[in-house]
């Protein structure tokens, strides 16, 4: 088939229109922004969707990702305020808010954010002691976030989070910290043990004090009751003595016999119950004691009545056929 010149022109025109349409129609995916340059100068930013530009005059300058992105910060050496060398790494999250500023205000955006984050990590962590560094990781993250976010703000970037992933002190420093922690725990254990011992001693002393107080109160009560008993006994003795004295004063001989017999009997009981007495010599005649007992019986008869229970008859001694001989007074020859 031979094409004429008109057909060739038509085909060329159709191809040109298709190329123009492809060059002028741009589709921007969601989460991205395209910058448009006219003869090398930024003019506008294309939003997600179907957009039309002027072919051969305007072109797409930069395709910026406006979704939140993560940036790993490699491990680096940091010297703290107290001259301790540690190794640390981090992770940063950022988002492009202004595509034009992110595209034309800084070159190599990710590299710039990475170096800025690393230098600020050394600055912030280098101004803190090791103990403060290990215990205040949240404070470090907050300071890093404020500093880095303020630094990247002219670039149209928003740093949403900076997190320290790991802090690794040297091995010898870790061993020293472990020994220090062990010493602190032993110290607290000794303090608790000493406090427990002190409290136990205090409680024992309180118990001894209460026991002594109760014992003293018991002794005082016993002494009071003993004194009261002695007082009652003395009153009874005085009353009995008074009654006997009045009987004696009235000329009652039987009262005198009762009083003498009572004292005599008490004296004999004391002699008989002595611990060091084995043999008792009585240099008195038995008839004296019998007479006293007779007097006591007569008094009891008057007191209790005239018909008391008759006592059991006493056995009469067998009369001797030989006269009694006094060993201290031997008989003389006639």
Image (cartoon, helix red, strand yellow):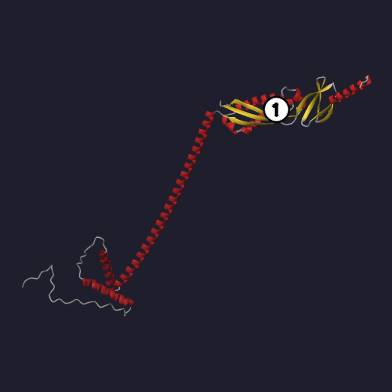
Q: Nearer the viewer, residue 155 or 87?
A: 87
Specify the farthest residue to the left. Answer: 334
Element under disc 1: helix
As drawn, 100 above or below 235: above
As drawn, 214 above or below 194: below
Q: Is residue 74 visible?
A: yes
Q: Residue at x 41, y 54 (%)?
A: 215
Q: Nearer the viewer, residue 95 or 2?
A: 2
* The quarter of the displayed image where residue 269 is located: bottom left
Q: Residue at x 54, y 31 (%)?
A: 174
* The quarter of the displayed image where residue 144 is located: top right
Residue topped by disc 1: 150
Q: Position of residue 3 (x, y in %)?
A: 92, 21
Screen quadrant of the C terminus: bottom left
Q: Is residue 252 visible?
A: no
Q: Residue at x 52, y 33 (%)?
A: 178
Q: Position of residue 194 (x, y in %)?
A: 47, 41
Specify the farthest residue to the front. Answer: 1
């Amino acid at each position: 088939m031979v094409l004429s010149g008109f057909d060739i022109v038509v085909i060329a025109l159709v191809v040109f229109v298709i190329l123009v349409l492809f060059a002028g129609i741009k589709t921007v995916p969601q989460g991205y922004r395209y910058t448009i340059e006219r003869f090398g100068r930024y003019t506008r930013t294309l939003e997600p969707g179907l957009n039309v530009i002027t072919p051969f005059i305007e072109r797409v300058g930069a395709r910026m990702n406006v979704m939140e992105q993560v940036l790993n910060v490699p491990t680096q050496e940091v010297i703290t305020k107290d001259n301790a060398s540690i190794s640390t790494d981090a992770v940063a999250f950022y988002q492009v808010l202004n595509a034009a500023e992110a595209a034309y205000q800084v070159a190599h955006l990710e590299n710039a954010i990475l170096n800025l984050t690393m230098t600020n990590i050394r600055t912030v962590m280098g101004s803190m002691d090791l103990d403060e560094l290990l215990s205040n990781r949240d404070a470090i993250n907050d300071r890093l976030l404020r500093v880095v976010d303020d630094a990247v703000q002219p670039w149209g970037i928003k740093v949403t989070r900076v997190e320290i992933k790991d802090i690794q002190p040297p091995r010898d420093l870790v061993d020293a910290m472990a020994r220090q922690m062990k010493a602190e725990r032993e110290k607290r254990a000794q303090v608790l043990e000493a406090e427990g011992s002190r409290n136990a001693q205090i409680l024992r002393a309180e118990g001894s004090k209460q026991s002594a107080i109760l014992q003293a109160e018991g002794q005082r009560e016993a002494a009071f009751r003993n004194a009261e008993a002695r007082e009652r006994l003395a009153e009874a003795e005085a009353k009995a003595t008074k009654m006997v004295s009045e009987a004696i004063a009235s000329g009652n001989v039987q009262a005198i016999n009762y009083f003498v017999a009572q004292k005599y009997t008490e004296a004999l009981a004391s002699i008989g119950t002595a611990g060091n007495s084995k043999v008792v010599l009585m240099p008195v005649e038995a008839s004296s004691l019998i007479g006293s007992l007779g007097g006591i019986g007569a008094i009891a008869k008057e007191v209790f009545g005239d018909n008391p229970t008759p006592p059991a008859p006493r056995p009469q001694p067998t009369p001797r056929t030989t006269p009694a001989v006094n060993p201290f007074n031997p008989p003389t020859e006639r």
